[in-house]
Amino acid sequence: MFQFYLPYAEKFEKVFLQNEIHEWEAKMFLKNIQNLKGKNSTIHASHIYASLRTLLRHGFLSFKRSESNSRIFLYSETEKLKQNRNHFLNTRLKSVIEIEKDLINKNIISLNTQKEYLYELLLKYPELNSEFINLDQKIDLDGEKKRAKLNILDSFLKIL
């Protein structure tokens, strides 16, 4: 998400993906990152403040002074951060859809292999013809379901 050095960059990414930032004090970032970091790890507040300054400088965050206390800054996300978040989520979603399509295609290939083997068994044991026909119909139904899922995933990709 970031093309520059940022302390705790992966933690900031998670915070930005899970939250919409509107008038957050620095302690909200610290609290959210500490929750992500775990109990046994230490977070250096100075690194968080340095990261906030870097994010301001790169245009991902904007700030204003608090009306109640002029020493406190309130941070909000900019349009740049929103666009980056949407692009990141769309890229991740496309990746997940492609992985799912690959799995379904492998399942379809497996069903085709099962069907071929079923025909070999049918030639070998013609007396079990009716049972083999039932199995063949089940395999065909599974294949149709898998192809329908593929069509749905292709439709999702076209929308993105």
Image (tube, rainbow, N blue to C red):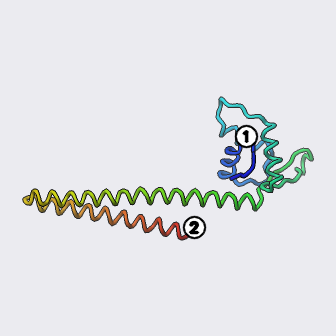
Task: Kindly identify which residue carries mark 1.
Answer: 31
Which residue lies at the image location 74% right of the left edge and 53% below the top edge? 21
Q: Is residue 43 above or below residue 87?
A: above
Mark 1 burial class by Cα count in 10 Å: few <14, some 14-19, many 20+: few
As helix, strand or loop, the secondary structure at mark 1 comes to helix
Rounded to the nearest whole Å, what is the CA distance between mark 1 and mark 2? 34 Å
Q: Is residue 19 left or right of residue 104?
A: right
**Between marks 1 and 2 in the image, the one whose residue lies nearer the viewer:** 2
- Residue position marked by numbered label 2 in the rendering: 160
Q: Quadrant of residue 61?
A: bottom right
Identify which amino acid the numbered label 2 is placed on.
Answer: Leu
Disc 2 element: loop
Left or right: where 54 falls relative to 116: right
Give the quarter of the figure containing the C terminus: bottom right
Q: In the orientation shown, which residue stands out farthest toward the left?
A: 127
Residue 50 vs residue 149: left or right? right
